[in-house]
Amino acid sequence: MPDAVPSFALLPGAAESPVILHVPHSAREIPAAVRAGIALDDGALARELDHITDAHTAELAEAAAGLSAVTPWRFVNRLSRLVVDPERFPDEREEMLAVGMGAVYTRTTHGAVLRPDDTDVEPLVERYFRPYARAMTRAVADRLAATGRAVVIDVHSYPTAALPYELHGAGPRPPICLGTDAFHTPPGLAEPAREVFARCGETGLDSPFAGAYVPLDFHGGDARVGALMVEIRRDMYMTEPGGPAGPGLSRLAAALAELVDGV
């Protein structure tokens, strides 16, 4: 039986735009067949979704796209990261395996059992992770073919207080955290981001979350692909955990639109 909603969507932008706003963690949808393999009851699952979902980031990206002079492309995950997390490495390279949060999570943000330890994760990887990765790879390749470069800007959020699953949660938690990659984040991408988001509050680099998403076919080998992760502390724009968005969303969307037009 097909899923109730598509797994992901590529929303077209301007033909001349190299920018893809990537929104991997904004959704709460879990297909019924996947829900059956999750050990939490409905109440506990709702609370976990409140903690783990980057709420309202799809709306933020949509608003920014609408404000941009040259409309960026948007690649949006329509399913919860509790189905699969498309930004994890699908193998032993993933450091989050240490807390049960590889491509398929087996533990919650607080260390409770999400899926049994003997869960066969391969069907989920095959059904959801690999098609997502292939589609994102095609999206980047299309921008390279059309414009000669591609810029992937990840749109994320993170909680004001560190959650137990965070491996690097003891460091600074600024209003805006910019995650960078040594190969794919040039100064011409990171510095404009710091400037436009400075009006929203202090901006830091790679704490509490580091790195930036690049499809594996291009990772570490194609400098035409730029990447930056924008992590917004949730108290800047919403009620935590899992509550409504506030007026801060508009200010952040304006800053993101300025970044899109500046790169």
Image (spheres, rainbow, N blue to C red):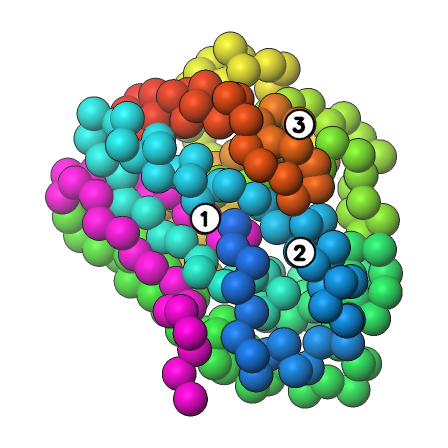
| Camera-side residue of 74 and 237 | 237
Q: Is residue 240 visible?
A: yes
The mark lying in front, picked from 2 and 1, is 2
- Going from N to C along the chain, the mark reached first, 2 or 3, is 2
Q: Residue drawn at (72%, 68%), measured in percent from left and top?
A: 42
- Going from N to C along the chain, the mark reached first, 2 or 1, is 1
| Secondary structure category for the residue under label 2 | helix
Q: Is residue 95 visible?
A: no
As displayed, is residue 62 above or below residue 106? above
Report how far apart the C-alphas of labels 2 and 1 lie in the structure.
Answer: 16 Å
What span is colored magenta in the figure? 1-25
Q: Which mark is residue 49?
A: 2
- Going from N to C along the chain, the mark reached first, 3 or 1, is 1
Amino acid found under the numbered disc labelled 1: Val
Q: Which residue is mark 1?
A: 23
Amino acid found under the numbered disc labelled 3: Asp
